[in-house]
Image (tube, grey):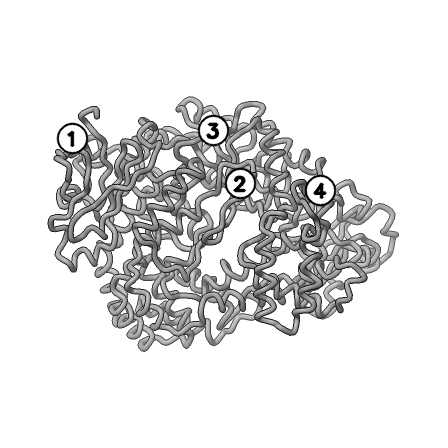
């Protein structure tokens, strides 16, 4: 198996095609990148910038460059010695425009008789034999807006097929609609009455059943071609938790790709491990991101930041937000589970729905993979009984139904049929509830220190000590050395540099408390947690445009669903919130508070950014650089983090390194590019230096501010908690313990002579980081 040493993620879209990516390959090769990593490239909804709404899995999207574009990119990568990794989406398809998706169009036209009816996860009986489509508006008699146009029904811009023989001349569009295999219903009915599986709560993304062999084959024929023709070297699998059988899916994928490198976008909760028997090299790196961020958070700031804005405890909060999701946005999924209960269960539908929703709210991880993870279900049952003693009897009935293996002597050989549809579907549903209740709700409510609110992380876990970090690194080296590491992705809530600056607030919690109190007094939003989140975010991303600030605030507030929501916006609150944001630009007092604090933490933010970057690039694993983040990047949540990248400027700065001196650490971002380049080049050029992991010992009064490790010849040294270091008088006589010899810092080119110790003050004279290699051949 060919395994990457590093990757560089590119967002392929109509405005940046595969041909554009091919032209960028020489820059990526010079940067030191080993593989090019592409966002989804199969044909997606027209105008889609992300590509996760695939409408035709049989072809590379023509608007993204098509088959010719993939060939051009692959050829360019091969010529430069680079591999190619592609993101694929096996869980769902885009159905926003039915006529663009032949699978979905066929189902709408032919109903259960369609060849593709089996491909989608549809409960026909729940809709009285019809597929419910939640597209109608809130007006009275919306069906009167239907128009019959040839063999199609049109509802404004929506187009739907008319089944053969169901439209007689002179009939009304409403009469024709009544004879179809689908029923157009009000959009608000989706959350409780939808009868097809969605991706989370997105009505326009319909789940597909790749557990069916023919569905897998047809959905992956084009992907198989990429490997048969040597165009692609590896795959990133989006949302495996949505699949009925992730383990079986990965086994089939490994087979058709000839044993290729495979990563899964699997969110692991703290302490959770990836299934050992999955055919994958590991996750896409959110777990690494969480560890790295917390190394640069001062644990001493926890109490002050916690007390600043009263919030319910995080565990209590996420139980509540998950329960709201199970009872609201995803109630149709809960109802589907209720319908799957055996007729003799003895549970009334209302009681069953209540108990199932409580179990989903109490589930401690995204999902189980029975028989693995049965203990998570047991844990959820126990927690649900504590929360709801009145449901204890119902929970006792549900437990063996959700895990039929409880009564079996051996669970060594488990199939989907032996588990049953109820148990399988509950596993698929728990991940949806976790994602929507935690990532998309609680992460916008729990604002103690917002740099910790990232996918795959637990904001209640405040900091990681150097000792803890070393143990996690050693475990990573032992258990998943080829898994990806990440700092920024297309899904992160805040980019790496935004988070790095926000984390500095933990070093000055009293100063943040004073600044926030002043801001809240000048422009009160009357929602303390949201105000705290927004002001922290803006301090982390400053300077940012007014347009970006308003767009982020609206999304954050509506996702939090505390003072306003997407479906019922609170105009009074939102007006107050937007006025506060305008004040950051227009009110001199508000602006002064923000800019003064940004200036106070700017240098420390640079230090955190550079240290986190070098750590991620050189730690055990395969580091990914998200497009553009070799420069400072203070992006916010999507779509902000998917903006166009100025690669011309990056090329220009990279070209200057040959003639210019070592760049300063300032807003120009050249220093970050230099550090990224030197680390990637060393890893690709001398991979033998990155085959182990040994912590580097540190001695002296500032030892806790220096974190280092030896990867087998490459020694990484970084600074942590820079303001605390400054307060205690700098490095003084702090030193790292290294064997006697000559070491060169590949970043600056400076050499250091060690007699057994190297002074931190000398190592960090230029940058807060160093990457050392022995020069004397020992």
Neighbourhood count class around disc 1 (C-alpha, 10 Å): few under 14, some 14–19, many 20 upward: some
Q: Sequence order check: which comes first, mark 2 or mark 4?
A: 4
Q: Which of 617 and 483 is in front in this view?
A: 483
Which residue of the protein is positioned furthest toward the front in this rendering?
A: 409
Quarter of the view holding residue 615: top left
Q: Which of 293 and 122 is in front in this view?
A: 293
* Front disc: 2 or 1: 2
Task: State how far apart marks 2 and 4 are (Cα).
Answer: 35 Å
Q: What element carries label 1?
A: strand
Q: Position of residue 269 (x, y in %)?
A: 48, 53
Q: Which residue carries the number 4 mark? A: 103
Q: What element carries label 2?
A: loop
Judge left or right: residue 485 versus residue 697: right
* Front disc: 1 or 3: 1
Q: What element carries label 4?
A: helix
Q: Which residue carries the number 3 mark? A: 73
Task: State how far apart marks 1 and 3 are (Cα).
Answer: 42 Å
Q: Which residue carries the number 2 mark? A: 276
Q: Sequence order check: which comes first, mark 3 or mark 4?
A: 3
Above or below, 77 relative to 575: above
Q: Where is residue 644 in the image (x, y as percent from the top left)?
A: 41, 45
């Amino acid at each position: 198996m060919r395994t990457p040493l590093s990757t560089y993620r590119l967002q392929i879209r109509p405005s940046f095609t595969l041909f554009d990516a091919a032209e960028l390959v020489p820059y990526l090769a010079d940067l030191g990148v080993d593989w090019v990593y592409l966002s989804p490239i199969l044909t997606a909804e027209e105008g889609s910038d992300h590509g996760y709404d695939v409408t035709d899995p049989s072809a590379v999207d023509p608007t993204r460059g098509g088959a010719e574009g993939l060939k051009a990119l692959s050829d360019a990568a091969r010529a430069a010695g680079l591999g190619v990794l592609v993101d694929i989406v096996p869980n769902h398809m885009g159905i926003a425009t039915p006529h663009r998706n032949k699978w979905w169009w066929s189902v709408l036209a032919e109903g259960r008789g369609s060849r593709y009816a089996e491909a989608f996860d549809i409960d026909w009986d729940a809709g009285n034999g019809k597929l419910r489509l939640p597209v109608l508006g809130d007006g009275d008699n919306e069906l009167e807006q239907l128009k019959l146009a040839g063999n199609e029904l049109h509802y404004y811009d929506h187009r739907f097929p008319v089944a053969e023989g169901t439209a007689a001349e002179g009939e009304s569009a409403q009469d024709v609609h009544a004879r179809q295999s689908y029923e157009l219903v009000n959009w608000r009915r989706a959350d409780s009455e939808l009868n097809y599986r969605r991706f989370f709560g997105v009505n326009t993304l319909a789940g597909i059943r790749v557990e069916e062999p023919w569905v897998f084959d047809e959905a992956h024929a084009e992907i198989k071609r990429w490997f048969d023709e040597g165009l692609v070297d590896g795959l990133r699998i989006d949302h495996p938790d949505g699949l009925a059988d992730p383990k079986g899916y990965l086994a089939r994928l490994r087979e058709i790709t000839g044993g290729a490198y495979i990563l899964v976008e699997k969110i692991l909760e703290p302490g959770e491990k990836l299934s050992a028997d999955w055919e994958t090299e590991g996750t896409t790196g959110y777990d690494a991101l969480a560890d790295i961020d917390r190394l640069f958070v001062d644990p001493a700031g926890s109490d002050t930041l916690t007390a600043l804005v009263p919030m319910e405890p995080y565990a209590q909060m996420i139980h509540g937000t998950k329960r709201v999701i199970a009872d609201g946005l995803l109630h149709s999924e809960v109802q589907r589970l209720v319908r799957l209960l055996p007729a003799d269960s003895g549970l009334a539908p209302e009681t069953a729905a209540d108990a199932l929703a409580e179990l989903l709210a109490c589930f401690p991880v995204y999902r189980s993979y029975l028989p693995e993870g049965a203990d998570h279900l047991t844990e959820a049952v126990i927690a649900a009984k504590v929360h709801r003693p009145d449901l204890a009897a119902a929970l006792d009935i549900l437990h063996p139904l959700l895990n039929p293996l409880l009564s079996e002597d051996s669970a060594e050989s488990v199939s989907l049929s032996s588990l049953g549809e109820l148990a399988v579907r509950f596993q698929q549903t728990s991940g949806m509830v976790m994602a929507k209740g935690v990532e998309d709700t609680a992460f916008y409510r729990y604002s103690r220190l917002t740099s910790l609110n990232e996918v795959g992380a637990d904001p209640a876990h405040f900091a990681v000590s150097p000792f803890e970090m070393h143990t996690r690194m050693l475990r990573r080296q032992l258990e998943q050395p080829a898994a990806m590491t990440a700092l920024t992705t297309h899904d992160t809530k805040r980019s790496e540099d935004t988070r790095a600056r926000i984390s500095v607030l933990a070093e000055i919690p009293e100063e943040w408390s004073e600044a926030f109190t002043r801001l809240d007094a000048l422009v009160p939003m009357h929602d303390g947690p949201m105000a705290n989140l927004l002001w922290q975010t803006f301090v982390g991303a400053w300077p940012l445009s007014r347009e970006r600030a308003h767009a982020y605030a609206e999304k954050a507030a509506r996702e939090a669903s505390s003072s306003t929501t997407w479906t019922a916006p609170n105009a009074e609150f939102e007006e107050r919130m937007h006025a506060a944001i305008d004040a950051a630009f227009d009110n001199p007092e508000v602006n002064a508070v923000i800019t003064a604090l940004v200036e106070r933490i700017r240098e420390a933010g640079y230090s955190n950014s550079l240290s986190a970057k070098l750590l991620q690039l050189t730690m055990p694993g395969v580091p990914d650089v998200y497009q553009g983040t070799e420069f400072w990047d203070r992006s916010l949540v999507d779509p902000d983090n998917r903006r166009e990248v100025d690669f011309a400027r990056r090329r220009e700065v990279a070209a200057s390194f040959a003639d210019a001196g070592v760049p300063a650490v300032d807003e120009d971002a050249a220093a970050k590019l230099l550090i990224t380049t030197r680390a990637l080049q060393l890893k690709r050029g001398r991979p033998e230096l990155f085959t182990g992991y040994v912590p580097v010992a540190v001695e002296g009064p500032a030892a806790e501010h220096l974190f280092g490790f030896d990867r087998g010849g490459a020694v990484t040294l970084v600074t942590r908690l820079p303001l605390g270091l400054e307060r205690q008088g700098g490095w003084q006589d702090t030193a790292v313990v290294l064997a006697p010899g000559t070491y060169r810092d590949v970043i600056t080119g400076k050499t250091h002579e060690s007699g057994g110790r190297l002074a931190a003050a000398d190592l960090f004279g230029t940058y807060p980081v160093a990457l050392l290699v022995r020069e004397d051949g020992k």
